[in-house]
Image (cartoon, helix red, strand yellow):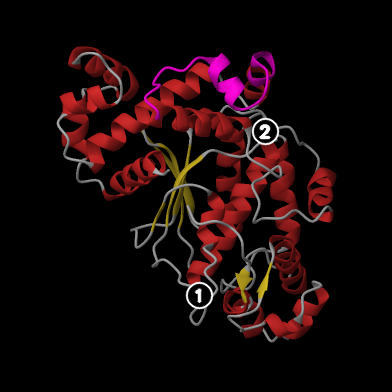
Amino acid sequence: MTSLHRGLDGEAVAALLQGAVRRGRDPAALLAAAGVDPEVYGRPTREIDGKALVRLMRQVQFALDDVYLGFFANGCRLALEAERMISLMGCATFGEALRVSIRFTNAMSADAGPAVTEQRGAGLHHTCQYQTIEGVDRQMLVWIRFLWIYHFFSWLIGRPLALRGLSIQGPRPEPGNGFDRFAVFRCPVRFDADVDALSYDGNDLAAPLVHCALQDYEAYYDAEPDWFEPPGGGPCWRDRTRQALLELHRCGEWSPSVETVAARLRTGVRRLRRDLSQEGEGFQQIRTRLRGELAGAYLLASDIPVTQIGFTLGFSDPGSFSRQFASWAGMTPSAYRARYGGDAARLASATAVLSEWRAP
């Protein structure tokens, strides 16, 4: 995945301000009020960091009294957003909060149109049908709203969401400074898709909320979060464990012990188990899921025979691989390949998983 060593370029900043400009706001004044050099505006060689992005987004929202930055014909006032936050923070889990948020959003704006669908083995899909006005960069609104969703719900549960993927209707942006703004989600992204959607890991749905007061929400923004960094300021233990397992898999160790992984992460076994538990995960759960992801990825993103895939992933015989895969996916490897081989979204995700595993 693209490294994050640059910031959002000035042309993208100008796209972010299109709704405000169309409503008669001075972009230089908005930038200055957010503590950003107005010379950034529209210049591909100038850029802003993740903290400045959050300040600017908030400044535009306050200036327009519109959650959606002026991209809709009829915006959503901040007072309604506050009511939605109060409703969400009364929920018990992320899954409940997500559904409450969608119902509230549908009642607030006819231009947002969010919905959720569940697909076996593919997590929970959260689609957003944004009806933007003419003359604005719709993909920019999709990006900033998806970024808000990712960071807000990660903050709400006290750890990073495990996004399984994004679907984006438009093409991949090609900024002159090389900053891939979609890489901040740290998950596979499929462009030119039929819908704009986030895909959540089903294991996150039961994650309990750790913040339940509107004052906490305001304090979060007052602390100037950096949205170009992982939520929480660094990789979570789930991601660290997954990365260590990937590295060991590349060396042919398909069932490394928790002791081996803890040593690789330079931590103790008890601490690793505790930290994973606090993130709602278990070591065995991560290890099993990762091996299943690799198996599914080989079935969809390669033409290697099923038997050979089993051997490649460390299984001693085809029968044990088929039985284990059926417990993961609810069907045999051959049935999985036949059923999902033409699914573009799954193919993109599978290709990304294999690329990650094969990376040196």
- Find residue 91 and name its label: 2
| Residue occupied by mark 1 | 137
Residue 190: x and y in percent read: 38, 55
Q: Which residues are magenta?
A: 251-272
Q: CA distance from mark 2 to mark 1?
A: 34 Å
Magenta segment: does it hold 262? yes
Answer above or below: position of 167 versus 29: above
Q: How many marks?
A: 2
Q: Residues within 10 Å of mark 1 (few under 14, many from 20)?
A: some
Is there any visible trace of residue 111 in the rendered image?
A: no
Question: Is disc 1 placed on a helix, strand or loop?
Answer: loop
Query: In front here: 283 or 335?
Result: 283
Magenta segment: does it hold 168? no
Q: Quadrant of residue 252?
A: top left
* Discs 2, 1 touching: Cβ within 8 Å: no
Residue 61: x and y in percent read: 72, 67
Q: Residue at x 41, y 44 (%)?
A: 359
The amino acid type, in three-letter code, at marker 2 is Cys
Q: Quadrant of residue 74?
A: bottom right
Query: In front here: 241 or 276?
Result: 241
Q: Residues within 10 Å of mark 2 (few under 14, many from 20)?
A: some
